[in-house]
């Protein structure tokens, strides 16, 4: 917190010079029709129109000023990652233009830019080269990069064997060390552990002190409030609000809590579709429920189907508080469940003992990816909703309980319970 405080105290260092500008950008995707209705739709459309065009971004214009930290917020699927990918020039907009005036590095979705079969070492060279560093420079910085990542032991293993956190550490270490003037970051730091997040924060402070520019996409509105000079709210692919972080976040939070739901008709599913999650059931004592108690044993049952045999699929869950932060995003790979091949229909049970979530509405999203987590077979947004009810803790602040034990010591401490 002290780092954040120092940052905020430094005031708004941004000048008028423009680091990056986005002008009237639109981006469309072709989206899959819902599988669950495929037969009905197939008949209704005579087998045509299995895709439709969908606007992920529509007429977006914004400026990023040199020296500012800009926070981008918005609901899941609102277009934030798409916007960052357009800024990073990984995606080409269908209309409009993007002008980048500074040396840029981007930390986008997990593993983006990494080659799964190559070692960490080779990926460092590949990535740094893509970010515009000469081989000699990379060699000179290599040790520093590896040290920052903390992956000395694993640097010669193929990155497909890395956990999500390890991916991020390496990607961040590279991005930071190419000495970017403009750094784009999409969410991903949340997968790093606490020490790593702390080191990233320190790096952000360094960058800010050097008048570097940061664009940060995150669901952690607290971070945006404390860290950013300005915030932009993206809503259904458009800029909905822009201004002081506190104001934008308040407006966003009120709207999210008020409606709490994506607009009808928005695609809930994306991916290449050879394997897909039909639905998610939430079970307690073997019975489907939509309410669970803190402290109970809960099973999230993913029902999947396939159109062909799938090798080494990775299943992932994202648990989110409704309209709020992501709480956890375990994957079968990180947790050591590694089916070599699946075919036909089946189920995946994710069993959580002693549910640590605090009371409130929650949503579950699911994802099925390839082993390297880079190919998305299926991403189902809001696969299920459920309410957590108060249970074995009296805590109400935050999103989880860590079930802490407390001990108050002193010369004459008398416990209330002993009176
Ligand atoms: N490659 C793609 N093909 C088809 N649709 C896509 C693709 N990438 C994104 N989309 C769709 O575009 C919309 C915006 O997605 P995007 O990933 O930009 O959202 P986001 O704001 O980053 O969401 P989140 O908060 O969940 O990260 C979503 O509806 C998504 O399904
Ligand atoms: Mg995103």
Image: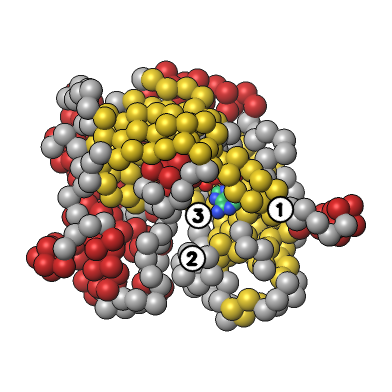
Q: Position of residue 80 (x, y in %)?
A: 47, 40
Question: Which residue lies at the image location 38% right of the left edge and 70% below the top edge?
Answer: 115
Local SS, label 3: loop
Residue corresponding to mark 1? 51
Q: Position of residue 208 (x, y in %)?
A: 19, 35
Question: Which residue lies at the image location 56% right of the left edge and 62% below the top edge?
Answer: 376
Question: Which residue lies at the image location 59% right of the left edge and 27% below the top edge?
Answer: 257
Q: Does the rendering let one see residue 82?
A: yes
Residue corresponding to mark 2? 373
Disc 1 and disc 3: Cα gap in Å? Answer: 29 Å
Local SS, label 2: loop
* Closer to the camera in the image, 72 or 82: 82
How dense is the environment of label 3, judged by Cα within 10 Å: few (below 14), some, or many (20 and up)?
Answer: some
Residue corresponding to mark 3? 329
How dense is the environment of label 1, judged by Cα within 10 Å: few (below 14), some, or many (20 and up)?
Answer: few
Disc 3 and disc 2: Cα gap in Å? Answer: 13 Å
Of callouts 3 and 2, which one flags the residue occurring earlier in the amino acid sequence? 3
């Amino acid at each position: 917190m002290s780092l954040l405080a120092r940052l905020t105290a430094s005031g708004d260092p941004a000048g008028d010079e423009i680091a990056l500008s986005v002008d009237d950008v639109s981006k469309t995707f072709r989206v899959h029709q819902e599988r669950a209705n495929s037969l009905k739709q197939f008949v209704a459309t005579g087998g045509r129109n299995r895709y439709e065009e969908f606007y992920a971004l529509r007429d977006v214009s914004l400026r990023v000023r040199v020296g500012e930290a800009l926070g981008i917020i918005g609901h899941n699927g609102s277009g934030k990652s798409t916007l960052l990918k357009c800024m990073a020039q990984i995606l080409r907009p269908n209309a409009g233009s993007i002008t980048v005036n500074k040396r840029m590095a981007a930390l986008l979705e997990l593993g983006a830019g990494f080659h799964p079969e190559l070692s960490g070492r080779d990926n460092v060279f590949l990535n740094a080269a893509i970010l515009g560093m000469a081989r000699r420079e990379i060699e000179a910085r290599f040790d520093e990069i590896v040290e920052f990542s903390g992956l000395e032991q694993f640097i010669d293993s193929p990155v497909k064997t890395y956990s999500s956190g390890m991916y991020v550490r390496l990607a961040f270490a590279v991005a930071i060390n190419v000495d970017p003037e403009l750094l784009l970051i999409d969410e991903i730091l949340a997968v790093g552990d606490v020490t790593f997040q702390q080191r990233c924060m320190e790096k952000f402070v360094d960058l800010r002190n050097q008048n570097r520019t940061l664009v940060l996409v995150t669901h952690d509105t607290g971070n945006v409030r404390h860290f950013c000079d300005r915030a932009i709210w993206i809503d259904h692919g458009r800029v909905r609000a822009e201004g002081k972080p506190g104001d934008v976040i308040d407006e966003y939070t009120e709207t999210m809590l008020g409606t709490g739901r994506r607009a009808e008709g928005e695609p809930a599913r994306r991916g290449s579709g050879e394997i897909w999650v039909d639905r998610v059931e939430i079970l307690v004592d073997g019975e489907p429920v939509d309410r669970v108690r803190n402290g109970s044993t809960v099973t999230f049952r993913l029902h999947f189907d396939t159109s062909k045999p799938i090798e080494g699929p990775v299943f992932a869950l994202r648990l989110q508080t409704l309209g709020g932060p992501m709480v956890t995003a375990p994957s079968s790979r990180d947790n050591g469940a590694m089916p070599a091949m699946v075919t036909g229909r089946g189920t995946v049970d994710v069993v959580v003992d002693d549910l640590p979530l605090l009371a409130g509405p929650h949503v579950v999203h699911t994802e099925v990816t390839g082993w390297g987590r880079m190919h998305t077979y299926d991403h189902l947004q809001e696969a299920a909703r459920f309410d957590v009810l108060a249970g074995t803790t009296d805590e109400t602040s935050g999103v989880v309980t860590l079930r802490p034990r407390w001990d108050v010591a002193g010369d004459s401490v008398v416990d209330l319970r002993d009176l």
